[in-house]
Each structure stands twice: as C-alpha cells, then as structure tokens.
Image (tube, rainbow, N blue to C red):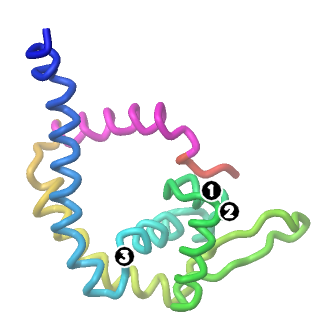
Amino acid sequence: MTEDLFDDPRLTTMGLLFEAHEGLVAKLEPVWQKYGLSGLDLNAMMRLSRSPGQRLRMSDLAAQTALSTSGVTRLVDRLQRAGLVRRESFPGDRRATYAVLTPDGAERLEQILPDYLATIERWFTGLLTPEQLDGLLTGLRVIRDAVHPDATAHD
C-alpha cells in the first residue's frame, strides 16, 4: 500500500511544477537583479502597468501578489522610495489608497522587458508548442481561479 502511495502521479505532477518554478526563477533572477529589482518588485510593477490607469487599489495589489496588507505596504514603500511607484488617494473614498506606476517605473519596465521577455521565451514559452502553451494557460487559469479567487482586480 505504501509503495502505491509514493508512486501516486499527483506527487510527480507537484514535483515537476515545483522543479519548473524553481528552475525558471533561477533563470529570471539575474535579469531582475541586473535592473535593480526583485522578482516581487517586477511582479507588482507589471501588474500596475497592465491595469487601467496603471494603478491598483492596495488591497487588489496585495491579493494579486499574494501579500498581506503589511507586506504590500512594505513593497510599495520600497518602490516609492526608488521613485517607481507612488500612492494616491481616491477622491470621495478616503479608505481607498492606490499604488500607481510612475513615469520612472514605466521607464524601468521598458528597460527590463526586452531581456525579461527573451529569457521567458528561451526557458519557458519557446519550449512549448502553441497548443501546449494554450493548454497550460487554460489549466493555470482554472487552478488560479480555484485556489486564489481574489487574484483579479476589482473595479
């Protein structure tokens, strides 16, 4: 019975996912560091850049980056000190604070994206056929929506 448990294909699936993630992070990390960013910094800035008005409520940014309220506050504080992000209050709703990508933040993204995208292509998307990539994206969205339903912005 124990042998069958150890050979469960679900363990293989999770192991491969973890190994792929760790390997991709190892390939991408030098790109982030070259531009003075961490992976979390880049993730937050990318989410802001792809949001309407290049801004998100702090609570939405926390959900999308899987950070606590205090964690996203520290992240935005660090990016604000670097001039890459600023905070804005929402007129008429003093409870809502937004993180907004600054022009310097957008410029830093424009600098890093060619290297970042080339690395993603080399070590991830370029290794898959279009059909494999489409299936992976579909599957990842299903899983993300089930385990992390707050990962999409609320407007």
Where is residue 138? Give x, y as percent: 33, 35
Judged from this view, the residue extending furthest toward the front is 2
| SS assignment at label 2 | strand
Label 1 belongs to which residue? 60
Q: Note whether 15 is above or below 92 in the view shown.
A: above
| Nearest the eye: 134 or 78 | 78
Where is residue 143? Give x, y as percent: 39, 33
Label 3 belongs to which residue? 38
User: Mark 3: which amino acid?
Assistant: Ser
Q: Note whether 48 is above or below 14 in the view shown.
A: below
The image quadrant of residue 142 is top left
Horizontally, residue 135 falls left or right of residue 37, namely left
Where is residue 1? Give x, y as percent: 13, 8
Label 2 belongs to which residue? 57
Span highlighted in magenta in the image: 132-150
Residues packed near mark 3 inside 10 Å, few (<14), some (14 to 19) or many (20 plus): some
Q: Are marks 3 and 1 in contact (CB under 8 Å)?
A: no
Horizontally, residue 35 falls left or right of residue 96, namely left
**Residue at point 58% right, 61% down?**
61
Q: Are marks 1 and 2 in contact (CB under 8 Å)?
A: yes
**Residue at point 17% right, 53% down?**
125
The image quadrant of residue 89 is bottom right
**Residue at point 55% right, 47% down?**
152
Where is residue 96? Give x, y as percent: 79, 64
The image quadrant of residue 77 is bottom right
Residues packed near mark 2 inside 10 Å, few (<14), some (14 to 19) or many (20 plus): many
Query: Gap between marks 3 and 1, in whole Å?
Result: 20 Å
User: Mark 1: which amino acid?
Assistant: Asp
User: Mark 2: which amino acid?
Assistant: Arg
Q: Note whether 49 is above or below 127 in the view shown.
A: below
